[in-house]
């Protein structure tokens, strides 16, 4: 048996003192670590200590939902009231002044978010959406007309009092008045397409006369009615119905050259004719070509985007620098069948197409 080494008590004490002490290990769960870090941060003044989440009772949740529903209904009621009031004012101006002494336009709006990001754009406003008619007239002439009508008299024509529409600058007058009517425009957009809570500082405006707008409506109707034929022709060419005419033409030239019987013995006359007919159908759309709102129609369109940097002012050459000099009102386009539906649907499809292309 091996000899046992004897150690004295003093030697044992010295060995105990010189031996390294085992380090203490504290096992802390993840939740405790997060709580400790939050407590240390709060003590250091970095962030507030997280308050314990209070569980919402079913009664409180129901009350909150009821409050939100009430607020939405109140906002919708207010918007419809604004639209109704403007409609009556519109009819009054047109009836009293006549269309010879007033000017009428169609107002369209488009969303341009400050971020510039496509994902921040309101889909239904991804392109111009017609929302209402606007009428402008000379307020002095309008008030004079109203005054003399109440007296049962006709307005006397003088050198200083005329009811000619030349007194109103049209587009500049509309541009001057719109800053005062942001809430009304938002209400028009709401009843037209259901869009709400718009940041009106991110909304662009454009106007055109009724003749121009009718060209756009007719072009979109033709585009919708013949969509099936256009899509079949586009599929044959390997393009999209909404591609620009120049892009379609480039594809067509390549395909027709490849399918020409004199150049390619493997092709057929039927294939050549099919390509030619498909291209002629798409190009024959004429007024319906193009993917933008401005692209609906032809040279008869006079759609004009309004420069917001000059909002609230107008040319002083004809005295149109005072909003008080202009009689102005709006009327919703919902009175015209399907106008809101077709343009809203078109814009949503364009927005979806842009998102899918990314």
Image: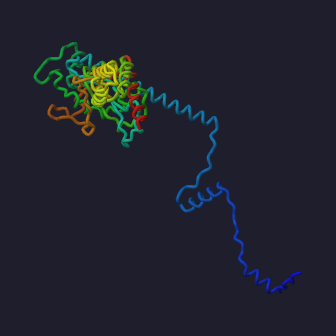
340 lies above or below 119: above
Horizontally, residue 170 falls left or right of residue 251, namely left
Closest to the observer: 47 or 1?
1
Q: Which residue ends up furthest to the top in the rendered image? A: 152
Q: Quadrant of residue 286?
A: top left
Q: Residue at x 39, y 41 (%)?
A: 117
Q: Residue at x 62, y 49 (%)?
A: 52
156 lies above or below 4: above
Q: Which residue ends up furthest to the left in the rendered image? A: 159
Closest to the observer: 78 or 228?
228
321 lies above or below 262: below
Q: Which residue ends up furthest to the front in the rendered image? A: 265
Residue 314 in view, yes or no: yes
Q: Residue at x 29, y 30 (%)?
A: 254
- Residue 346 in percent (x, y) is at 38, 26
- Residue 238 in percent (x, y) is at 37, 28
- Residue 217 in percent (x, y) is at 31, 20
* Rendered-image quadrant of the C terminus: top left
Horizontally, residue 296 falls left or right of residue 121, namely left
Residue 89 in view, yes or no: no
Closest to the observer: 327 or 11?
11
């Amino acid at each position: 048996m091996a000899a046992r080494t004897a150690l004295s008590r003093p030697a044992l004490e010295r060995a105990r003192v010189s031996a390294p002490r085992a380090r203490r290990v504290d096992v802390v769960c993840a939740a405790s670590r997060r709580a400790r870090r939050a407590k240390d941060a709060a003590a250091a003044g970095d962030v507030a200590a997280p308050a314990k989440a209070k569980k919402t009772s079913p009664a409180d949740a129901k009350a909150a939902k009821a409050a939100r529903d009430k607020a939405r209904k109140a906002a919708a009621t207010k918007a419809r009231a604004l639209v109704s009031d403007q409609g009556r004012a519109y009819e009054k101006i047109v009836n009293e002044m006549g269309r010879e002494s007033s000017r009428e336009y169609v107002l369209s709006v488009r969303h341009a978010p400050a971020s510039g990001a496509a994902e921040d754009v309101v889909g239904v406003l991804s392109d111009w959406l017609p929302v209402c008619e606007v009428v402008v007239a000379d307020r002095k002439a309008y008030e004079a007309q109203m005054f003399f009508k109440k007296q049962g008299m006709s307005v006397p024509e003088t050198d200083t009092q005329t009811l000619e529409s030349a007194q109103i600058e049209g587009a500049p007058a509309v541009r001057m008045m719109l800053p005062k009517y942001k809430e009304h425009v938002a209400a028009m957009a709401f009843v037209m397409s259901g869009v709400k809570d718009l940041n009106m500082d991110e909304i662009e405006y454009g106007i055109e006369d009724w003749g121009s707008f009718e060209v756009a409506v007719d072009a979109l109707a033709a585009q919708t009615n013949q969509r099936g034929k256009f899509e079949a022709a586009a599929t044959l060419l390997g393009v999209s119905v909404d591609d620009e005419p120049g892009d379609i033409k480039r594809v067509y030239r390549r395909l027709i050259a490849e399918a020409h019987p004199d150049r390619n013995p493997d092709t057929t006359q039927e294939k050549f004719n099919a390509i030619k007919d498909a291209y002629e159908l798409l190009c024959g759309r004429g007024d319906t070509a193009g993917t933008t709102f401005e692209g609906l129609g032809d040279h008869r369109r006079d759609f004009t985007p309004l420069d917001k940097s000059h909002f609230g002012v107008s040319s002083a050459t004809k005295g149109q620098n005072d909003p008080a000099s202009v009689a102005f009102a709006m009327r919703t386009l919902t009175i015209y069948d399907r106008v809101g539906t077709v343009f809203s649907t078109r814009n949503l499809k364009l927005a979806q197409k842009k998102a899918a292309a990314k």
